[in-house]
Image (cartoon, helix red, strand yellow):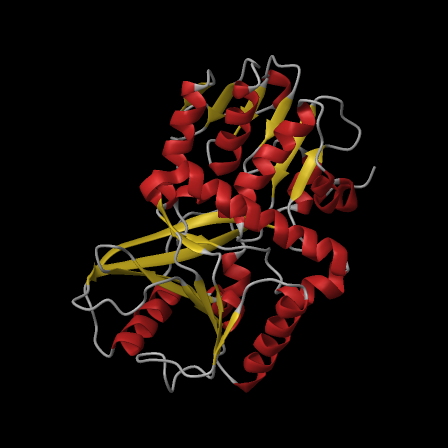
Amino acid sequence: MAVVGGGVTGCACALRLAEAGKRVRLFEAREIAGGASGRNGGFALRGGAPAYDVARRELGAGRACALWVLTERYLDRLEQLAGDAFRRTGSLRLAADAGERAELTAEYEALREDGFAVEWRAELAQPLAGRFDAAIFHPPDGSLQPARWVRRLAALAVEAGAELLEHERVESIDSLEADQVVIATDGYTHGLVPGLDAAIRPTRGQVLVTEPLERRLFPYPHYARHGYDYWQQTEDGRLVAGGFRDKATDHEYTAEEATTPLIQGQLDRFVAELLGEEPRIDHRWAGIFGTTADRLPLVGRLPGSERVWVSAGYSGHGNVLGLACGELVAGAILGAPAPELELFDPARLLGG
């Protein structure tokens, strides 16, 4: 069996297959965690890209609830596997204005109605007070050191018997001598399967990291403006901030891993305003993730193929969903498909 992609999905899939006694080769064009799995802001959140109340409208109450339950279960799985790369902190979704406060209220009420843990925060501490209208706190969520986590997951796969081949770019699925092939490349699928090129849109996320700050201001991941702004503080005090791709949407739908003056300038101003001073910026980077039309991943066998499977297109929520879907697709290959796979059936966007 062959797995293409050395991020969280590919490593999780390889681990599950190897533990089942299958011979697995994983191919990574660069190094393990070299793509989006090692280049993100380190948010480990339940659910998917839509807010819970939106997911209930779009998917139906039962399917939305199943998705949230799945991701809460895989947050527990992540905690079991990740060691010191993961901290169970909760996360804070903030309202940037009155309109977003109303949206937070709707999500809060929907989560409460369906029995999910959530807290309303009307009073915010500095430096959030006065800048944001209110917030909801999601207790199950956490903070991740993404590259360290994926490398640990890869090591577990190797211990289980998987063979990992770094700097081995797969140009064609036909070149792989394997009875089953899993495409686990999220936003880097271009050229492997024509249908995926149309269904999964590469999208760039940009991030900066400050010097260690003197004060610990943000004990958990924060995000606002529908996730377009996000930040958290690392254990050594650095502020990791990302987002603002809505300021240049057309330019940020790209597979080019490059920072840009426009987005980085927005991030610089945001961090300075948030902290009340201009800290030294130690690192800047960009990563590519895959976006789908309905903001759900494509996970399962490719329509019309008995050999090729896909698990990609997480729309910016791959840290937890990538782990879940990597294991789900492996389970299906092993003959034990989980009911949750129906949520992500590739045929809904690829036809067949």
Looking at the image, which residue sits at the far left?
214
Which residue in the rendered view is the most extreme toward the front?
115
For residue 215, say whether it is visible: yes
Q: Is residue 118 above or below residue 131?
A: above
Q: Position of residue 101 (x, y in %)?
A: 55, 81
The residue sitting at 59% across, 55% down in the picture is 47
Drawn side of residue 150 relative to residue 176, left or right: left
Residue at 57% in and 22% down: 17
Residue 55, image x, y percentages? 69, 62
Residue 147 screen position, x and y as percent:
36, 41
Above or below: residue 129 compared with residue 254: below
Q: Quadrant of the N terminus?
A: top right
User: Residue at position x 54%, y 86% from top?
Assistant: 98
Q: Quadrant of residue 61 in the image? A: bottom right
Q: Nearer the viewer, residue 244 or 113?
A: 113
Q: Position of residue 219 (x, y in %)?
A: 32, 64
Tell me: residue 28, above or below residue 87: above
Tally of numbered tags: 0
Identity of the residue furthest to the right in this view? 352
Can residue 190 be seen here? no
Quadrant of the snapshot with the C terminus: top right
